[in-house]
Amino acid sequence: MNTSTETLEAQEETSEVSLLDQVMQETRIQPGDDGFETARRGVEAFITDLLANSKKIDKVEKKLVDDMISAIDKKISGQLDEIIHCDEFKKIESSWRGLNFLVNRTDFKQNIQLEMISTSKLELIEDFEDAPDVTRSGLYKHVYSAEYGQFCGKPYGAIISGFALDPNAQDLKLMQDVAAVSAMSHAPFIASAGPKFFGLDSFQGMPALKDLESIFEGPQYAKWQGFRESDDARNIALTVPRFMLRSPYGEDNVGKEFDYQEGINQDFEKLCWGKSSYAFASNMARSFAEFRWCP
């Protein structure tokens, strides 16, 4: 019984290989050419799918091929959804698209310069924690010592953050340290406020908030209110809300390689959102280009 089964499988495999070789001989691609192996694997998968089909197929028509391509696109779309909707990937895409948004909307002919510092919020926190004093921190040396405090230096007009800040103790300490550097360098620090600033897990609940002022009267905002009373606090601005950097892939945003239909399913957290600090910085650059100052 086992011998018969193995023989039958071997015959089917031989038939499939023979058919594959016949098909490849009809193509213009020859063994050794670039792309031959890729084309061969594609034809092999196509034949395997035909043989596995329970329905009798007398003729391979265009509709059948289109249906198979559509099925492949759907499978790849599902796999790609898992990748681009991963939290870590969304952070990377948001950062790069946010920077691209700012660069594309900046008129560099108007004596405007952008400089990017690759650092995370945690790295910036550790920079201040490792320094015995704010003036010994890496940010101070980069922004103040190397430019503002240097003869013929090029002082920064503003420091734009690509990460969001929350009203927790760690972020408030970071704001205090950055505010001190901004005050000495005359370069305001622009960042985005996260949803936790309003007691939310997501910005989707923000339209339902009725009384914002009463939210900040809670005890959890005592340190935040204390920071606001300090002189250096005037050098920090927090912006809201987020904005969409990319439309979902599909009919309104067609993919270049294949028909990718991004699966959002009304879950708006899967969209590519950008920090509003980039939009604010874009308006600053536009204002300077038009009026030579940023009101």
Image (tube, rainbow, N blue to C red):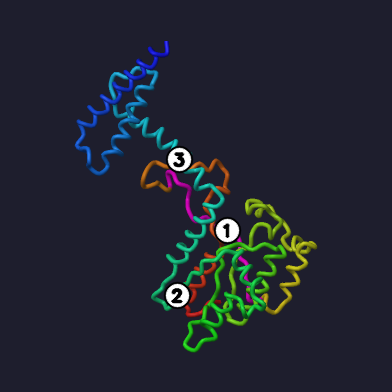
Answer left or right for 185 relative to 73.
right
Q: Nearer the viewer, residue 212 or 99?
A: 99
**Quarter of the C terminus within the rendering:** bottom right
Q: Which residue is situated farthest in the bottom direction here?
A: 151
Q: Position of residue 227 (x, y in %)?
A: 72, 72
- Amino acid type for the residue under numbered disc 3: Ser
Query: Which element carries disc 2, helix, strand or loop?
Result: loop
Q: On screen, 210 above or below 67?
A: below
Real-space Cα distance between discs 3 and 1? 26 Å
- Chain part drawn in magenta: 234-252
Q: How many numbered marks, from 0 up? A: 3
**Can you identify the residue that label 3 sits on?**
77
Magenta-drawn stretch contains 280:
no
Residue 83's tag is none
Query: Which residue is disc 2 drawn over?
Result: 113
- Residues 258 and 241: in front is 258
Identify the disc placed on residue 242: 1
Q: The N terminus appears in which quarter of the rendering?
A: top left
- The residue nearer to you, when weighing 253 against 34, is 34
**Image spot of residue 134 (x, y percent):** 64, 78
> What residue is at 56 percent from the left and 61 percent from the top?
275
